[in-house]
Image (spheres, grey):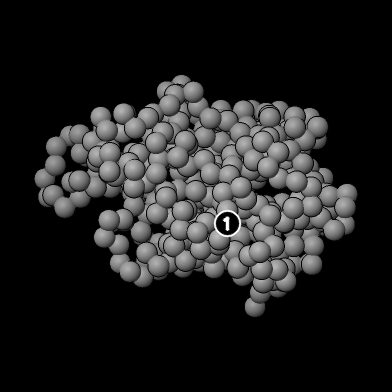
Amino acid sequence: MMIRPPKILNVKITGTGSYLPEKVETTEDFVKKGASPEKIDYFGVSEHRVMGENETVTDMEAHAAKKAIKNAGIKPDDVDLIISGTGMPTQIVAPNSNALQHRIGAKNAAAFDVNMACASAIPEIMIAAQFIELKHYQYILLTGSSHLSRIADPTDPASFVVLGDGAGAFVMALADDKEKGILSFDIQTKGEYFNYCGAKVKRPKKYAGERQFHDPCVEKLYFYIGDFDNPSQSIMNYLIDSVPATVQKALEKAGMSLSDIDFLITHQNITPLAGKWIEKLDIPPEKTHLTYSRYGNMTSANIFVNLDEAVRMKKIKEGDIVVFAGQGAGFSVGAIVMRW
């Protein structure tokens, strides 16, 4: 049985930050790696960023976190809790948030990780909101990051073209205005598609069916995605329909409709999916901020980076109804309706 949240979780995002590595890979680089111009155009990713050889995902998160903390007008000592949603941690154990806590000097903060893949920002925000509403913590730092380019399948353009590196962060706190905060949320899961994409030890896609393979093709950790050129109709329907469906469900819980959305912040991957979500939600270009053509799919960093850029460009106004939405491998989708 689902327990509905209070009518308003009286919280706000008080500071945002993001970090993008300096190295840029462009269409020319993708073609050199074996992607056709037609495939690149189909994905809609013309360039992305790649983490430096001497960088770690914790480095990226620390850069973004420090910006968010500064923009919130607080100090690292003021942070009470860190929730991290990295796409792939620096190491499997311990949680990446622990390393981040040390790196930014947030010595008073507790820390833990959340994983809903690309959509990790959704449960992060909801967990933080309830801690703040219950007055357990005053300032909570949320982060999302990705360096999946390091495990991109070199034989699959859906992996080595689409995946981009980057990190973003929010600081959340109690809102002064009782009418502002989180109005509703929705999370849905369809575990039957668990094996459609993710990261696991496997052969490169090109050699997946071969019994014998040579050294460059040995099994290792790769990001993989199912046959996107010939998916089953059921999974294609799910990939396209699930995000608009969770947004509509969240809006219904808030007593609202699509026409009430002032701004949409969504996880973005490729044009055939993210483009369809925006089309189905009937969101005009001025009501969202698109970055995937420049940064690729930064998995759990997308929502963070997209919001940070939109805020810095002053696209979101006080009192706006902002909807956050995402889809994560596994598959889970989620949406949050918030009065800014």
Residue 53, image x and y in percent? 42, 23
Name the residue at 81% across, 32% down: 73
Label 1: which secondary element = loop
Name the residue at 28% across, 47% down: 202
Residue 76 visible from this viewpoint: no
Residue 16, placed above or below residue 303: above
| Residue 79 shown left or right of residue 330 in the figure | right
Tell me the kind of residue under disc 1: Ile
| Residue 317 shown left or right of residue 302 in the figure | right
Quarter of the rendering containing residue 172: top right
Quarter of the rendering containing residue 282: bottom right
- Could you classify mark 1 by the number of other residues whose Cα lies within 10 Å: few (under 14), some (14-19), or many (20 or more)? some
Residue 219, image x and y in percent? 25, 43
Residue 5, image x and y in percent? 74, 67
- The residue to which callout 1 is attached is 283
| Residue 156 shown left or right of residue 13 in the figure | left
- Which quadrant: the N terminus? bottom right
**Camera-side residue: 219 or 251?**
251
**Camera-side residue: 263 or 132?**
263
Which residue in the rendered view is the most extreme toward the left?
212
Number of numbered markers: 1
Residue 208 visible from this viewpoint: yes
Quarter of the rendering containing residue 99: top right
Name the residue at 39% across, 51% down: 198
Residue 195, image x and y in percent? 36, 60
Which residue in the rendered view is the most extreme toward the bottom?
1
Name the residue at 67% across, 36% down: 313
**Camera-side residue: 256 or 182?**
256
